[in-house]
Amino acid sequence: MRKCIPNILTVLRFLIVPLLLYAMFIYDQEGQALYSLFFFVLASLTDYVDGALARAWNVVSDFGKIMDPLADKLLVLSALAGLCWLPPYRLGWLIFTIIFIREAGISILREVQHKRGIVVAASYLGKVKTVMQMFGIIFALAAWAFLPAVSPALRIGVKIWFWIVVLITLFSGFNYLKALFLREDR
């Protein structure tokens, strides 16, 4: 049973995403940002705990290698969609589109490789990208939830942060492609 707990937490993260989307896009009342923050942090904690448990118990599964990064991507893209299209941030469609294309492309490549019997786990830079995305989203949601108003300076700061995240996202994607092609050259 213990070996299943990290995978159960990954599945739980998938189940939290619709609640996050509801809080961000449909629940248009006082507390919208607070509920969005709560669901995002809860899902992020499941990511941290499932990774810590998998390492501590030396539990590695093909399911975890594929589904854990996919759950992360779905969670991040869901929250990022809200930050890109909803006030107070409206970061813009370009940030979302670049990150979405990279995440979707790498996920598709991962699945193709998995079907060929090759499992490529997330790289260190990919994990840094995910942490930066999650930190930026938590910060933006917390500011939205707890400040009386999000100032123009804060909006600009959040936008700059996410453009840096875009660069790291692209760089980690190129590193993934490089590792994949080097593996296929063998």
Image (cartoon, helix red, strand yellow):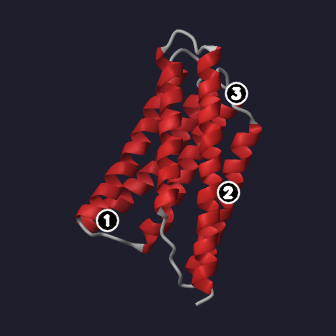
Q: CA distance from mark 2 to mark 1?
A: 29 Å
Q: Residue at x 58, y 15 (%)?
A: 150
Q: Which mark is residue 163?
A: none
Residue 181 against residue 5 in the figure, above or below: below
In the rendered structure, which amino acid carries the disc numbered 1?
Cys
Q: Position of residue 14 (x, y in %)?
A: 49, 51
Residue 90 is marked as 3
Asked which quadrant contains residue 6, the reply is: bottom left
Q: Earlier in the sequence, mark 2 or mark 1?
A: 1
Badge 3 density bin: few <14, some 14–19, many ≥20, Cα 10 Å: some
- The residue that disc 2 covers is 102
**SS at mark 3 in the image:** loop
The quadrant holding residue 159 is: top right
Q: CA distance from mark 3 to mark 1?
A: 39 Å
User: In terms of secondary structure, where does tag 1 sit?
Assistant: helix
Is residue 1 positioned above or below 138 on the image?
below
Q: Which amino acid type is shown beneath numbered disc 3?
A: Arg
Q: Disc 1 designates what residue? A: 4
Where is 27 relative to 169, above or below? above
Q: Position of residue 24 (x, y in %)?
A: 59, 30
